[in-house]
Amino acid sequence: MKEKRARRRPELHGCRRILRLSGIALLLVCSTCSLYFFVPSIYYSFPVQKLLEDIHLVSNILNRAEKESDMIAFSCRHRYGWGSSLYSVHPDGSNLRLLRESPSQAHAGLSWSPNGNWIAFHTRVSSYYWSFSRHWSYEGGTPEIYRIRFDGSISKRLTYNDDREKIPKWSKGGKHIFYAFGGLRRISILTGEIRVIYDQLFRIYDLTSDGSTVAFVGHFESSASPSGADKRGNRNEKLIPYAIYRMNADGSGLRLLKYLDDSVYGMQWSPDNSFLLYHRYNGRPFVLNVRTLEEVHAPAMRTLRAKWSPDSRWLAIIGEGGTYREGDEWHRTSDYERDSSSQIDNLYLLDFETGEVEDIIDDVNASGLAWSPDSEWIAFSRPAYLGQLYKIRRDGTDLQQLTNLECGVLEASWSPK
C-alpha cells in the first residue's frame, strides 16, 4: 500500500506576505479609528444622551439627599485644556461635591432654583478637543441648557438642538427656566415644553426676581437707526443697538428704557427690581432707576465684575487696581499706585444708600463673585491665575479659603437657602 504524502502548500513570496500582513494591519487600524471617532459621536448624540439622562433621572429619584444649608456652586477650569468641573460646597468649606466634569465643556451661567435644590447652567463646548494627557473627545458643538441637583444625584439636559442656548434664569415658582438663544425662550421643568417668548436678536438679558419682567440690550449688529427711535418708549419693530429695553415675561409690553451711544454688557436687575446695573464700554458701572430712567450712583472706576447684594443695598465690585479710564487717562480711586507692568484687581463695596466706595481686599480674580443670602458674606476667587474659592465678610474681616483644588474658579453662585 502506497504511503500518502502530505500535500505541500505553496510557499508565499516574501513580498506577498508583507503586503497581506500590511493590509490586515491597515484594516484593523481603520476599524479602530472608526470606532474611536464614530462611537463617541453616537454616544453623545441627542437621542442617546436624552435616553441615558432619563434612565439616570428615574434611577436616582428615590435616593435624593436632603439639603442641609445654603451652598455655593462653582465651576472650576482644568489646569490644562478647555474642560471644567462643576462643584458644590457648604459655606464653611465642608461637603465639597463634584457634580459634573467634562474634558471639553465649560460650565457657565450658574443659576439656583428658588428652593435652592437645583442649579441650571449652560455649557460652552469644543466639538473635538485634544487633551495632551488623554485623548480626543466629542461632546457636541453648541451651548445647551442643563439642570442638576445640588448633590449631583440627578442631572438633566433640557435642550437638544443646534441653537446657542445660554444664560438660564429660573422663574419665581421654579416651574420654568428662561434662556437666551439670540431671542428668548422658556422651557417647562415638568413637561419639557419650549415656548418662544421673543424672537428678535438681542445681546444680553436679565429677569427680575419676581419673574415678571425682562430687561435686555439691543443687538449691536441691528440695522435700525437710532435717529428713528421712539424715545418715549413705544414699541419698535427693529431693536436699536446699544439701547436698553424691558418687556413682560410673556413677551408683551416691549418698551425702550434708555438709548446709549456705546456698548453695554453685564446687565443685572437689583433684587428689589427697582434698578438695573450695567457696564459701559470703558468698564465703568452705571445704575439705572427704571422708574425715573435716570442713571444714579455710577462709581468712577473700571470694573471687571459686579454683583448686587440680596438686600439691594450693596454692590460688590471687582475693579482693576482701584482705577478707571476716562479718555486716555487713568484715574485712581484709592492709594493704590497703578503699575503698567502688572495688573492687580481689588474687591470694592459700594454702599448704594450713600454712594461711598470702600476697598475690601486686594489681589482677587475677576471670576467667581457671589453674595450669601443674608448679604453678610462675599465669595470670590484668588489669586488671579488658577484661583481658589474664598469668602470674606462685607466689612473686610474674617477671610477664609474654602477650596484647595487643581483647577481655577471660573464662576460661583450662592444658593438662596
Image (spheres, helix red, strand yellow):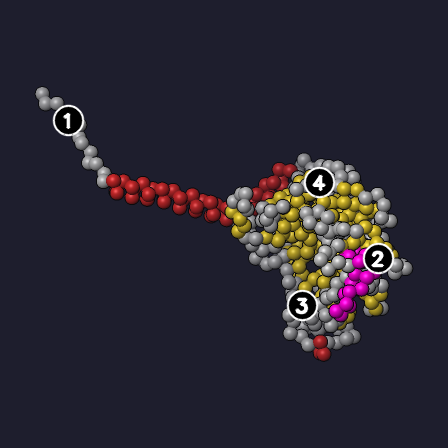
First in sequence: mark 2 vs mark 4: 2
Horizontal placement of 56 versus 178: left or right?
left
**In magenta stretch: residue 8:** no
Q: Which mark is residue 335?
A: 2
Q: Are marks 3 and 1 in contact (CB under 8 Å)?
A: no
- Disc 3 to disc 1, how far (Cα)? 89 Å
Q: Is residue 193 visible?
A: yes
The crowd level at tag 3 (other Cα within 10 Å; few <14, some 14-19, many 20+) is: many
First in sequence: mark 3 vs mark 1: 1
The crowd level at tag 4 (other Cα within 10 Å; few <14, some 14-19, many 20+) is: few
Q: Quadrant of the N terminus?
A: top left
In the rendered image, which residue does mark 3 sit on?
A: 219
Element on which disc 2 rests: loop
Residue at the (68%, 64%) spot, across then down: 203
Which of the 4 quarters of the picture holds residue 336? bottom right
The picture places residue 232, in percent across and down from the top left corner, at 78, 75
Provide the residue span drawn in magenta. 317-337
In the rendered image, which residue does mark 1 sit on?
A: 5
- Disc 2 to disc 3, how far (Cα)? 39 Å
Q: Which mark is residue 404?
A: 4
Along the viewing direction, whichever of 2 and 79 lies nearer the viewer: 79
Amino acid on which the number 1 mark rests in the picture: Arg
The crowd level at tag 1 (other Cα within 10 Å; few <14, some 14-19, many 20+) is: few
Disc number lying in front (3 or 4)? 4
- Disc 3 to disc 4, how far (Cα)? 40 Å
